[in-house]
Amino acid sequence: MKILVIGGKGTIGKKVTERLSEKHDVIVAGRTSGDVIVDFSNSSSIKSMFEKIGKVDSIVAIAGDAKWDKFNNLSEDDFYIGIKSKLMGQVNVVRIGKDYLNQGGSITLSTGVLADDPVYMTTSAAMVNGAIHSFTKAVALELENNIRVNVVCSDLVEDSYEKYKDYFPGNTPVPMKKIVDGYVKCIEGKITGRIIKIFG
C-alpha cells in the first residue's frame, strides 16, 4: 500500500513509519521536515499536500497542537489553537483526503487518554480529543467508496514518559509497540468508525 503519515517524524509517528515501511510505501508529511511539508492548521496547505502526492491507499494523521494551561488562564484564542490545529486539521484530512484515497482506503486519526480521563490543565486538549471521537463515529456512516475511518486513542506513551510524567501521576506508560499495533489494526484491518483505546 501507499501510505501517507502526517506527523511521521514525531514521537509516535516515527515508530509507526518504521513499522509500516517494512511492508508498505510510506510518505512522511511534517511541519518542517519530511517528504512533503504541510501546515496542519491550514486547509489550503493540506489540499496542496495531497495535490503533490496524488492518490494513496491509506492516510494516517498523528499531528496537531492544543494549548495546555489552567482554565482561568485560557483565552478564546487559546482554545482556537486546538480547534484549528488538532481538531480541524484532522477533520480536514478526512474532508479533503477522502478524494485522494483509492477505493477501500482508510484514514486513521489520533487522540489520547484525555478524552476519557483528563488531567489538570488539559481542558482544551480534552475537549478537542472528545470532539474527534464524536466526529469519527459520525463521519464513518457517510464516507463513500468503502473508505474507512478510525481513531487510535493512547495513554501516556513510554517514549514521552519522562517529559510528561508529572502531568499524569499514576498513569502506567504504554509500550510503543502496543500503540503502533493499534495503527496497524486500523490500516491493515477492516474496521471502521472505531475508537481504538490503548491504555496502560
Image (cartoon, rainbow, N blue to C red):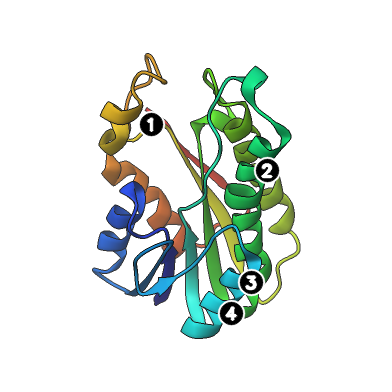
Please give the residue where the numbered disc 4 appears in the rendered image.
100
Residue 31 at x, y = what percent? 43, 61
Q: Is residue 86 above or below residue 171?
A: below
Q: Residues within 10 Å of mark 2 (few under 14, many from 20)?
A: some
Looking at the picture, does residue 51 appear above or below residue 164? below
Q: Amino acid at mark 2?
A: Tyr
Q: CA distance from mark 4 to mark 1?
A: 32 Å
Q: Residue pushed farthest top?
A: 170
Q: Residues within 10 Å of mark 1 (few under 14, many from 20)?
A: many
Q: Label 2 belongs to which residue?
A: 80
Q: Which of the two discs, 2 and 3, labels the residue nearer the N terminus?
A: 3
The residue that mark 3 highlights is 44
Judged from the image, the secondary structure of the residue bearing numbered disc 4 is: helix
Residue, disc 1:
156
| Dot 3 alpha-carbon crowd within 10 angstroms: few under 14, some 14 to 19, many 20 or more | few
Picture coordinates of residue 192, whole percent (x, y): 59, 57
| Cα–Cα gap, marks 2 and 3 | 18 Å
Disc nearer the start of the sequence (4/2): 2
- Residues at badges 2 and 1 in contact (C-beta under 8 Å)? no
CA gap between label 4 and label 2 equals 27 Å
Earlier in the chain: of badge 4 and badge 1, it is 4
At mark 3, the secondary structure is helix
Specify which label sits upstream in the sequence, 1 or 3. 3
